[in-house]
């Protein structure tokens, strides 16, 4: 970091998952360089591919840079005063006519803690309603509920060092290799015994000593069986559990089940069930890490409780190398929980249903009122909007038309809403299309504040770029509206002042009752706040706290933890009738949420460029669909279309579809429209992992792709996906009806000049149903289109490379029309996005060099040498290199 070309380094934090990695951004006359922050405890300098590519997502293309107001004449640009007054007046009017519960906020784990704090303060303390919920409801609210039931407070007891200390790590409902790669690699380097519990065989199974592919929705049966087995085989810590827990007998009674029954219900071999139980029972240092596969369920809270019960019964909590560990999904999901960002919480871990807590928060804020009852949780909130109960909603930093279940219902709700306000960094999203006011917010690199990661570690997210256009910080936008509504208490002069108030509230009337306590940080001035080092709460005068509950005292009034009875129950909707398959949804390795950020990076687009339907080959045969061809996934709530894939990791009876594609990036790949809207009765978290569906053919007559330097209108194409390339856009297309004049069709679609005015190259094979054409501009490739009656079109990679050339040589023109790269080598799909290494390169290195290990491949071509999330794919190529060469 002593390079004189880069004289200034800004230490910030990553914008993606809850691992909370530190990022070092070097700034100088020659531009910007980005790397992992070696001094940050969460990652010690390592970054996954998404974090490494953050610098590629900072362009202003597609940014919302000025307030926009929609009136009878359509959208128009507005000044900040007009836009804020319109929002304030609209909210005032609704409240005066219908009361405070007629307005709502729907916010995001992408917000910084300071943003979260002021919007929660405005809603609960000044407007006086708890109708504020967050997209964290969709991923972590079952953990929140499970923690509160067990510990009396939403607390993750352990820290990342526990993964280094553990002799056994159980990863359940967590594809950590792709979703939390830095944690995954930390485990892989340590090499403890690893058990993976997941219906799919994911990349995480690469390090598993035992994989339990349980039937979807049967987690409670498995962990109830473990609890029963631990008790019967003498592995309970009777002295510790007797002194520090309550509810043991009730929990054991509800959990009673024999291993044979567990094996039958979970559809896992009995020997594997017993191997898991025996390993857990005889290994003292066990960490059970879980994520969305546990949380996103109509019984998600019980799944969390069933896991925690096993650790409480055996006293495996609060000490190095042991404990339940919730791996959070978003960078500030925990910060949002700290400030009470959920509809059923108060700020600073205080309870909305506790009159003393409500009085305490109101007194601290000196607010005119305080919310007296829980507000509407996410799914119920949008139902209330559609019914007219809620008449104004402000959406901040999230895209519910894509991400919520039964997403078409969200569309209907917003279209019926009297006032829809959206503050975001992106101009065109599925949700923005339904708004009345758009407010431009700051993006990563421009924002300044704090986030809290999965191990309770608060880190600074620092700005290193100027605010573009008229964009403003979210906290500043909210304060501007609050002041125009006539409210005091929002005159903050910067995020440091908000953080100080947040820290003061955490200690206000606390006296040790709540573990969340930032009291020693309450006096930070601007300079100290700017210099704040990562620290774990609770913060004491001596510093942060790595682990909690080592003393056996929990946050319930009597100081004892609770073992919670978890009678098992099946998912809310069973398969049957025409819906015989179970839909599971989740993330891909190199993408994030609805791709408004990662979709800008050509490197990240290459690993998985289109949505897909992953299903077992036998299920595909039964449903008359074929790999590589389009199919429709349909449920009682909606449908989507994508190509079929056979990964080898999906069990019979299940299908998997990724969550990332929206109406902005594909014609009909929004999987949220298909997902059922049933929620956990305690947490309100939706059941994203178990929706009954059917899969059916989606008939088309031709497939095509287009590479173009300029965007294209594709409204009349039957099916399309847009992919960001390096200097071009790629469109994957499919259509119905024969293309009787493909040249005419291609010219019209690409907007090519008529006749001889264009430098137009084309080739047609009428018998084979193939057509290829290219538009040249000054000997430079501007656009090309490839059409075929079959989906097996040529590789796109080498064609994309032609866009980097200033001119195309005659041989390159010929190769383009032939659909074959010069030299004939196969590039293959991207495997290592960190270093841009493709499957063909890896395979040829293996064959030519006689390589036999991942380490040898890394040494030769660098693949796998950074975040390591591609290592499972490298192993696949090592097993069959000729298939990829």
Image (cartoon, grey):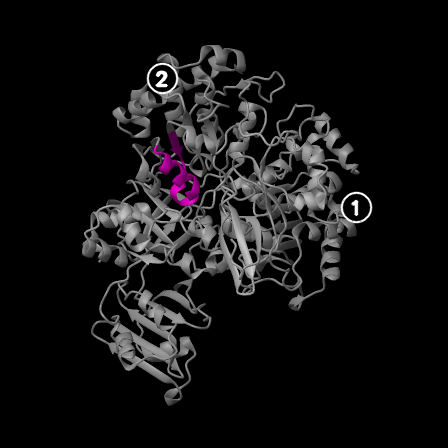
The x, y position of residue 400, in whole percent, is 54, 50
Q: Which residue is more in the foreground, 124 or 863? A: 863
Residue 172 magenta-highlighted: yes
Magenta stretch: give its range.
169-191
Q: Residues under labels 2 and 1: Cα distance? A: 58 Å
Can residue 749 be seen in the rendering of this structure?
yes
Residue 449 magenta-highlighted: no
Label 2 Cα crowd, 10 Å radius (few <14 / some 14-19 / many 20+): many
Residue designated by label 1: 487
Identify the residue at image location x=28%, y=69%: 788
Above or below 763: residue 663:
above
The x, y position of residue 430, in whole percent, is 53, 57
The x, y position of residue 519, in whole percent, is 69, 32
Residue designated by label 2: 229
Identify the residue at image location x=36%, y=85%: 759
Q: Which residue is more in the foreground, 121 or 323? A: 323
Locate the C terminus and report the quarter of the image it occupies: bottom left
Query: In the figure, is residue 15 to the left or right of 838?
Result: right
Q: Quadrant of residue 842?
A: bottom left
Element type where label 1 sits in the image: loop
């Amino acid at each position: 970091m002593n390079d004189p070309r880069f004289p200034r380094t800004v230490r910030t934090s990553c914008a993606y998952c809850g691992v909370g990695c530190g990022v070092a951004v070097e700034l100088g006359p020659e531009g910007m360089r980005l790397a992992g922050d070696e001094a940050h405890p969460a990652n010690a300098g390592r970054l996954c591919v998404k974090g490494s590519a953050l610098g590629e997502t900072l362009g202003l293309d597609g940014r919302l840079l000025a307030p926009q107001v929609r009136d009878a004449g359509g959208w128009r640009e507005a000044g900040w005063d007009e836009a804020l007054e319109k929002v304030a007046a609209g909210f005032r009017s609704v409240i005066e006519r219908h009361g405070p519960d007629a307005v709502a906020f729907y916010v995001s784990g992408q917000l910084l803690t300071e943003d979260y704090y002021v919007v929660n303060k405005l809603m609960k303390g000044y407007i006086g309603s708890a109708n504020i919920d967050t997209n964290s409801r969709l991923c972590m609210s079952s953990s929140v509920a499970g923690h509160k039931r067990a510990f009396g407070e939403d607390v993750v007891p352990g820290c990342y060092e526990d993964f280094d200390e553990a002799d056994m790590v159980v990863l359940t409902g967590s594809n950590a290799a792709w979703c939390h790669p830095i944690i995954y690699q930390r485990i892989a380097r340590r090499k403890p015994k690893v058990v993976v519990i997941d219906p799919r065989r994911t990349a995480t199974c690469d390090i598993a000593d035992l994989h339990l592919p349980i039937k979807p929705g049967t987690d409670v049966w498995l962990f109830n069986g473990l609890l029963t087995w631990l008790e019967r085989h003498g592995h309970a810590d009777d002295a510790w559990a007797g002194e520090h827990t309550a509810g043991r007998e009730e929990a054991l009674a509800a959990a009673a089940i024999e291993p044979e029954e567990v094996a039958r219900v979970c559809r896992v071999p009995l020997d594997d069930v017993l191997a898991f139980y025996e390993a857990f029972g005889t290994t003292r240092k066990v960490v059970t890490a879980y994520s969305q596969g546990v949380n996103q369920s109509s019984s998600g809270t019980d799944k969390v409780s069933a896991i925690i019960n096993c650790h409480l019964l055996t006293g495996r909590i609060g000490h190095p190398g042991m404990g339940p560990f919730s791996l959070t999904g978003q960078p500030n999901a925990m910060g949002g929980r700290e400030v009470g960002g959920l509809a059923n919480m108060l700020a600073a871990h205080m309870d909305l249903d506790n009159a003393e807590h409500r009085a305490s928060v109101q007194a601290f804020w000196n607010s005119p009122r305080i919310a007296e009852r829980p507000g509407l949780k996410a799914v119920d909130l949008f139902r209330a909007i559609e019914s007219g109960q809620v008449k104004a909603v402000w959406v901040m930093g999230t895209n519910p038309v894509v991400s919520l279940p039964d997403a078409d219902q969200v569309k209907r709700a917003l279209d019926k809403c009297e006032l829809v306000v959206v503050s975001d960094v992106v101009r065109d999203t599925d949700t923005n299309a339904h708004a009345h006011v758009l407010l431009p917010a700051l993006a990563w690199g421009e924002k300044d504040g704090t986030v809290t990661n999965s191990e309770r570690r608060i880190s600074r997210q620092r700005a290193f770029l100027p605010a573009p256009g008229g964009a403003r910080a979210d906290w500043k936008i909210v304060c501007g509206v609050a002041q125009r509504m006539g409210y005091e208490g929002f005159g903050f002069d910067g995020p440091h002042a908000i953080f100080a108030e947040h820290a003061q509230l955490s200690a206000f009337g606390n006296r040790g009752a709540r573990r969340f306590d930032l009291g020693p940080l309450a006096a930070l001035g601007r300079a100290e706040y700017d210099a704040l080092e990562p620290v774990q709460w609770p913060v004491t005068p001596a510093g942060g706290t790595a682990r909690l509950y080592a003393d056996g005292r929990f946050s319930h009034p009597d100081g004892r933890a609770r073992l919670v009875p978890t009678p098992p129950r099946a998912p809310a909707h069973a398969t049957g009738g025409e819906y015989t398959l179970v839909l599971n949804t989740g993330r891909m390795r190199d993408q994030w949420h609805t791709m408004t950020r990662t979709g800008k990076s050509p490197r990240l687009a290459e690993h998985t460029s289109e949505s897909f339907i992953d299903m077992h080959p036998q299920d595909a045969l039964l449903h008359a669909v074929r790999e590589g061809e389009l199919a429709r996934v349909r449920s009682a709530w909606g449908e989507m279309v994508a190509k079929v894939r056979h990964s080898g990791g999906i069990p019979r009876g299940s299908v998997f579809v990724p969550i990332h594609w929206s109406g902005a990036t594909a014609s009909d790949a929004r999987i949220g429209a298909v997902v059922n809207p049933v929620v956990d009765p305690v947490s309100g978290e939706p059941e994203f992992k178990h929706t009954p569906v059917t899969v059916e053919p989606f008939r088309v007559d031709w497939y095509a792709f287009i590479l173009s330097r300029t965007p294209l209108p594709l409204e009349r194409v039957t099916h399309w996906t847009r992919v960001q390339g390096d200097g071009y856009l790629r469109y994957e297309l499919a259509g119905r009806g024969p293309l009787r004049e493909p040249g005419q069709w291609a010219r019209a679609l690409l907007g090519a000049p008529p006749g001889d005015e264009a430098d137009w190259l084309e080739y047609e094979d009428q018998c084979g149903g193939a057509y290829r054409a290219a538009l040249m501009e000054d000997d430079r490739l501007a656009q090309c289109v490839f059409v075929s009656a079959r989906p097996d079109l040529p590789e796109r990679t080498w064609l994309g490379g032609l866009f980097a050339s200033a001119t195309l040589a005659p041989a390159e023109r010929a190769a383009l029309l032939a659909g074959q790269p010069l030299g004939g080598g196969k590039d293959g799909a991207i495997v290592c996005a960190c270093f841009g290494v493709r499957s063909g390169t890896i395979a040829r290195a293996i064959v030519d060099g006689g390589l036999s290990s991942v380490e040898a491949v890394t040494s030769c071509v660098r693949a796998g040498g950074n975040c390591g999330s591609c290592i499972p794919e490298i192993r696949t190529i090592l097993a069959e290199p000729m298939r990829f060469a």
